Amino acid sequence: MALPKEPRQKMINIMYLVLTAILALNVSAEILESFKTVDKSLQSSNANLNTSTNLLYKSLQEKLAEGTTMEQAKIWQPRAEEAHKYSEEINTYIENIKKELKTEAGLVIKEGKEDFKEDNLDASTRLFETKGKGLELKKKLDDFKTKILGIDGSIKTAFENNFPVNTDPISGREGKKDFTTGYFHMTPTVAALTMLSKFQNNVKNAENQVVTFCHNKIGEVAVRPDQFSILVGQSSNYVMPGQEVEITAGVGAYSAAAAPKIAINGSSVPTVEGKGTYKITANGAGAHKVPVVVNYVDLNGAPQSAKAEVEYVVGVPGGAAVMLDKMNVFYIGVPNPITISSGSGWDKTTVSLTGGTLTGSGSNRSVEVSTIGAASLTVTAEGKSSKFDFRVKRIPDPVFKVASGKARMQSVEFKGQQFCRAELENFDFDTRFSIMSATVYFSGANFPNVATASITGNSLAGLAPFINRCGPGSVVTFDNIKVNGPGGPRNIDGKSFALYQ
């Protein structure tokens, strides 16, 4: 466009050109919100990886104190701690870069909250290119990889070809771009912060994989039974005069090296000859359950956990009793079957319920409730009334799962799945939840930029283009999960899956 000679018109035309350029550089609010959503998902994934890794560190400390694993732990626990040290160093470094980037974008603290120009295109270019932070970050990431692989020869062999942290040039339509240009040149501030969270995710994923490797090395310790003890059980835990009780006995073989740790009803109990004893005073009419958890080391030296429940019934001599066939709780959205004993004939017995609806007749009844709180059942037999109070609860949230549902999963196992599910864990009722929708994020290995997709229903078929790209070091996060089940639709916790070889 030719500029006119008249000064005023020339100035108007110049201002028009400047305004057009500004509008061209403006980043839409929708794009900014998308980056913020991905950044939130990455931080959630980082928190999940931290939880998983911290559990491994705790287990490594315990193995240092156990006789059967002490020698192996002395070798591999320090290696895991070294990986933790390197991970913490670079994670702290990246957090400091985030602060510098926000400062470049005009950071101001207003009422305790950060406020900066999220759409600023110059801040990242100025910090990472002009001030050289891009090359510095690349060197830090490369040094992190070198240090981790240098901890031990077997670690280098296992992870050298699929290490989660990668600073190679980025390929695009305009050819390959170097690390700084590809990630930070003319990038909105909020997008650059998301990229930094991505690198933190890569680092934490690498740390988790290496610590898992060290932990598995300690598990290679064999345990053999070397002690024996008598085991005694009973056929019934509710008897009346004249009824028969059957006693069974046998011999159990166990290893002192298995070091069983027993918890009954939530309390740790002393272990003598491989067994723990717990006494409880029965009270409260009806059915009761006592959970039992035993943690031990199996014949291959691997830590295991076994769970069981001891059930017993407290009767009411000469009176009424109410026994829930499932639990001592009424759940919303499902029929709650109960068994009632009146201590008299049903022609002389009446039953009433407050806080719900009672159906059925005789001993076998069903209760339906709709509001969280309490419900009371009154049984009147031959003019004598017995009142039984119960809690009313919502069915717990199901757990989102793909395949085994483990947070760490072999990539080949994940890639072979076509469906996801929402599964109730440790719940006695036969009820189901169905997946309605979820947002899915792909990051880590093979995803230099976080990819976003969504599902409706439990089919993963629509994610095939992304799942096919997954490999060891990839992280798949399901968020904003909505399910439908008893009581209607609800949102449940998201889940991240870290894939490995």
Image: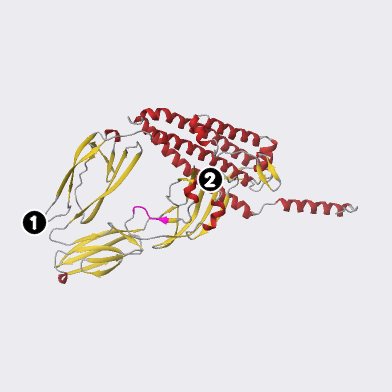
Identify the mark at residue 242; answer none if there is no mark: 1
Is 183 on the left-hand or right-hand side of 318?
right
Q: Secondary structure at mark 1?
A: loop
Q: Nearer the viewer, residue 381 or 302?
A: 302
Residue 98 image position (x, y, % from top left): 59, 40
Residue 172 image position (x, y, % from top left): 67, 47
Residue 381 image position (x, y, % from top left): 16, 66
Q: Nearer the viewer, residue 342 or 501?
A: 501
Q: Nearer the viewer, residue 99 or 296?
A: 296
**Outermost residue, left side:** 242
The answer to whether residue 257 is seen in the rendering is yes
Q: Secondary structure at mark 2?
A: loop
Determine crowd level at label 2: few under 14, some 14-19, many 20+ residues with C-alpha closer than 10 A.
many
Amino acid type, label 2: Gly
- Against 60, residue 34 (above or below) is below
- Residue 105 image-quadrant placement: top right
Residue holding disc 2? 471
Is residue 423 shown in magenta? yes
- Against 53, residue 329 (above or below) is below
Circle 1 or circle 2, nearest the eye = 2
**Separation of residues labelled 1 and 2 (CA atoms):** 66 Å
- Residue 189 image-quadrant placement: top right
Query: In the rendered structure, which disc, 1 or 2, sits on the residue that comes first in sequence?
Result: 1
**Outermost residue, right side:** 5
Which region shows up in magenta?
Answer: 422-426
Is 190 on the left-hand or right-hand side of 260?
right
Name the residue located 76 percent from the left edge and 53 percent from the top edge. Answer: 20
- Against 37, residue 333 (above or below) is below
